[in-house]
Image (cartoon, grey):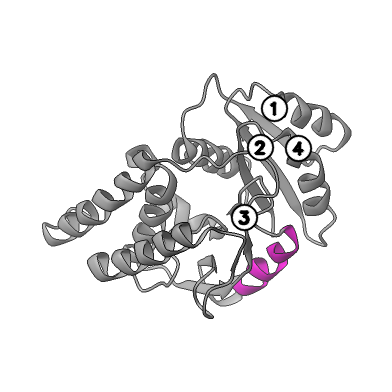
Amino acid sequence: MKITVVIPTYNEKENIRSLLSRILQLPHEINVLIVDDNSPDGTGEIGEELGKADGRIRVLHRERKMGLGSAYVAGFRQALNDGADVVMEMDADFSHDPSEISKLIGAMDDCDLVLGSRYIHGVTVVNWPLGRLILSYMANVYTRVITGLPVRDATGGFKAFRRKVLESIDLSRIHSDGYSFQIEMSYLAWRNGFKIKEIPITFVDRRVGISKMSKRIIWEAVWLVWRLRLQELFGRA
């Protein structure tokens, strides 16, 4: 099973070397695709340097900072073109533990999309301020109530898709970002009839660097769930 891990980056030079080292030590056939939005700190160049030493690493350079959602869409397309059987997504800041990649891969035996969940067994989040934790938890309750999506953590970004799931989604119609992107991709997979499984992970707030969270991302997610619900009601989902 050929696995590609897609990692969007913007100013992640403090993390990228050690992150890739951890991922590529795992006992799986893994390639890593970095999607770099022209990081001023040279993250993309570091990725190129590492790729010259290890052919499993590739960098997709973009001209400017264009958002998490479009970075993943570009990465997914490239991974599919490269023949990946499973496409994973994860953050570059160690909030997603590379050692838990094996858990997601192992869970794919009987499902099509695996979600690393922070809320399936209580709350497994470390070092988040209380306000952000409450915001995240309630955003997932809100999403579940409005859309009917039967998952506890729709906004998380640690996932593994079978190839056929991504091929079933018209990626050219995905324009959401941040939380919204994660919700929309899982929702569309569910609406297309694919089996989703959540497994517990421990989410740790980034150890270095600056969070990319913004009010725009939050409000986009607020309105997205209603758009998805209305599209379903009017038969356009």
Residue at x 31%, y 44% (from the top left corner): 220
Label 2 packing within 10 angstroms: few (<14), some (14-19), many (20+)? many
> Of the residues under marks 3 and 4, which one precedes in the sequence?
4
Circle nearer the viewer, 2 or 3: 3
Q: Which residue is mark 2?
A: 34
Tell me the element at label 4. Answer: helix
Which disc number belongs to residue 14? 4
Q: Amino acid at mark 2?
A: Ile
Q: Which residue is mark 1?
A: 44
Q: Are marks 4 and 2 in contact (CB under 8 Å)?
A: no
Which disc number belongs to residue 148? none
Is the stretch drawn in magenta largely helix, strand or loop? Answer: helix
Tell me the element at label 3. Answer: loop
> Can residue 176 be seen?
no
Label 4 packing within 10 angstroms: few (<14), some (14-19), many (20+)? some
> Of the residues under marks 2 and 1, which one precedes in the sequence?
2
Asked whether 86 or 57 is in front, the reply is 57
Q: Is residue 52 a member of the stretch shown in magenta? A: no
Q: CA distance from mark 1 to mark 4?
A: 12 Å
Q: Position of residue 196 (x, y in %)?
A: 46, 71
Q: Which residue is mark 3?
A: 205
Q: Are marks 3 and 4 in contact (CB under 8 Å)?
A: no
Circle nearer the viewer, 4 or 2: 4
Circle nearer the viewer, 3 or 1: 3
Along the horizontal axis of the image, is 58 left or right of 170? right
Asked whether 34 or 10 is in front, the reply is 10
User: What segment is highlighted magenta in the picture?
Assistant: 98-107
